[in-house]
Amino acid sequence: DSYIAIDYVDSNCANDNFEYLTQEIGRAGTASVNTFSRSLSLSRNDLSMSGLRMPVDTSHIYNGAFDTFFEMYIGMMERAEGVEDMLPFPYGNNWKPSLFMGIFSTAEKQHLFFTEEGTIVTFNEKIETITEGEGETQITTTEIIFEEDETSDSGYTLELINQEDGVSTDNMKIISPNGEEMYFDNGGLVTEIREEEPNADGSYDKISIFYDEETGMYIDYITDGIGRIYDYIYNSHSQ
C-alpha cells in the first residue's frame, strides 16, 4: 500500500534544517531569525585564539528555547546545595556559553545531547545482539548502542567508552560531525574536547573544561591544546 511518512524536526535553536535571516549587530554579535519558526538567536564572540593545537574559540549564544534544556537538566540535578536557586538559567535568561554542553539521560532510556549551538539531539538506547562463529563455537553477546532519533539528522554519534562499565554519562563520548570527541563528567557536562587522532607521542590535542566547586554548573576555566588557561569571571547576574 502507498503511504506518506512525515518526520518532525526541532525548529528551535540553530540547525541546518532551516533557513535563517542574519544581521550583524556590531559588538553585540550576530542575530539570526529562523524563517519558519521566527525564533531569534544571538551569537556574540567572546574569544578566538589562533594555533594548530586545539585553540579556543568561544562565544555566548542566546535562544528562547534554551529554557527547555536548563529546566529539565537543573531540575534533575543534585550536583550541590543551592542549585535550585539557579533556575531556570545559570548564565542569564536564555543565554549559554558555546562550550557549555551536556548529556541528560531520561528514565525512558533516551539521552539528550545539548550541542554547542544549543540544539537538542536525542539518542535512543538499545540492546544489540552479536553472534559470532557457528555450531558449538557460536558465541552470542550483547552490546548497548545508541541510535539518533529519526526526528533529527545531526551527524553526531553517541558511544560507550567501555561496555563493561554500563550506562553513565562519564562512560560516554560524543563524536561530532568533524571527528572531534567529547567526554563528560558524571553529571553530564562536557569536560574534554579532543582531536580524534593522537599525536606521534600518543598525546591528544584537546580543550579541557573545569567547573566551579560550589555548584558544578558554572565554567570556572578552560585550557587549550598548548596549556593556555582562560578564566571565567561572573557578576551577580551570571554574566
Image: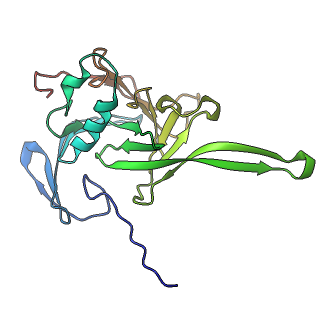
> Residue at the location (31% across, 17% down)?
80
Residue 143 visible (yes or no): yes
Q: In the rendered view, tell whether residue 171 sits above or below residue 115.
A: above
The quarter of the picture where residue 81 lies is: top left
Q: In the rendered view, tell whether residue 22 sits above or below residue 162.
A: below
> Residue at the location (10% across, 26% down)?
237
Name the foreground residue: 173 vs 214.
214
Name the foreground residue: 70 vs 209.
70
Quadrant in which the C terminus is drawn: top left
Residue 215 placement, left or right of 199: left
> Residue at the location (35% across, 64% down)?
8
Residue 88 placement, left or right of 4: left
Residue 215, given in percent of the width and then of the height, sits at: 28, 19
Residue 180, given in percent of the width and then of the height, sits at: 46, 42
Q: Residue furthest left?
A: 26
Residue 74, given in percent of the width and then of the height, sits at: 29, 31
Residue 58 visible (yes or no): no
Q: What sort of colour scheme is used for the picture?
A: rainbow
User: How many badges with numbers are in the image?
Assistant: 0
Q: Residue furthest bottom?
A: 1
The quarter of the picture where residue 45 lies is: top left
Name the foreground residue: 111 vs 31.
111
> Residue at the location (54% across, 42% down)?
159
